[in-house]
Amino acid sequence: GQQLNQSPQSMFIQEGEDVSMNCTSSSIFNTWLWYKQDPGEGPVLLIALYKAGELTSNGRLTAQFGITRKDSFLNISASIPSDVGIYFCAGLNYGGSQGNLIFGKGTKLSVKP
Amino acid sequence: DAMVIQNPRYQVTQFGKPVTLSCSQTLNHNVMYWYQQKSSQAPKLLFHYYDKDFNNEADTPDNFQSRRPNTSFCFLDIRSPGLGDAAMYLCATSPRGGTGYTFGSGTRLTVV
């Protein structure tokens, strides 16, 4: 089945530093999504990417959809304490009646003030 | 605001005692999904409804059932919860085709 490899598994950084995480897949996706999940909460969508090569920003976050449609990265600039959480990439092949999200295993981000 | 609401946020049930988790949406999305997320793992799809059509993932245990009485509500029934079923259960919705995925805040299930 389809799998996403997300790295790194965890990161410990100093407040103000930039962060980069990425996902790769053995198969193609129509859409890449990046979510943040806080403890005890559901995933919250950060950025959605729909076109190969697309580069999209959302405040301090920037994400790109790889040309091959098999990878994506997420960058966070000038990290702050509230960036702490688990970041998931997810691939989606939509069409027909439904879209099954395939999740990466997550990157746990810790930020030291 | 349009949203996906899950109740309760926390549920404690006894081993073997049936439990029902609920999800409601105001987005009028065709598709509703149930995911299971165990500690430190990614969410895993259990099943989904496209309107009234039920679609079960191949590896979802028979212990898990779902009902969707109308567009707005979807229920997850666990017939005989085991200790291994303790997890966060996430409901999500999307329009036909899958874009616009929205998650609820989840229900944390504890089995004692």
Image: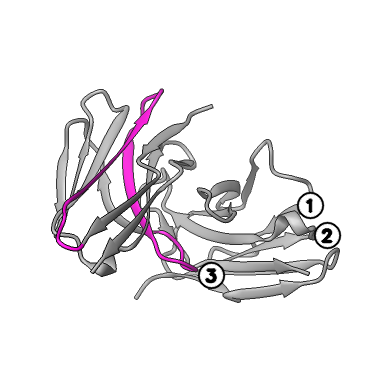
Q: Position of residue B1 (x, y in %)?
A: 34, 76
> Which residue shows up at 27% across the image and 48% down it?
A48
Magenta region, residue range: A15-43
Q: Are marks 3 and 2 on the same chain?
A: yes
| Residue B62 is a magenta residue | no
Q: Which sits earlier in the primary sequence, circle 3 or circle 2?
A: 3
Q: Camera-side residue: B23 or B63?
A: B63
- Identify the mark at residue B63; answer none if there is no mark: 1
Q: Which sits earlier in the primary sequence, circle 2 or circle 1?
A: 1
Q: Position of residue A67 (x, y in %)?
A: 21, 26
From the viewer's perspective, is B53 left or right of A1? right
Could you tell me which chain the residue with mark 1 belongs to? B
Foreground mark, 3 or 2? 2
Mark 2 neighbour density, 10 Å: few (under 14) some (14–19) many (20 or more): some
Helix, strand or loop under label 2: loop
Q: Amino acid at mark 1?
A: Asn
Foreground mark, 3 or 1? 1
Helix, strand or loop under label 1: loop
Q: Which residue is mark 2?
A: B80
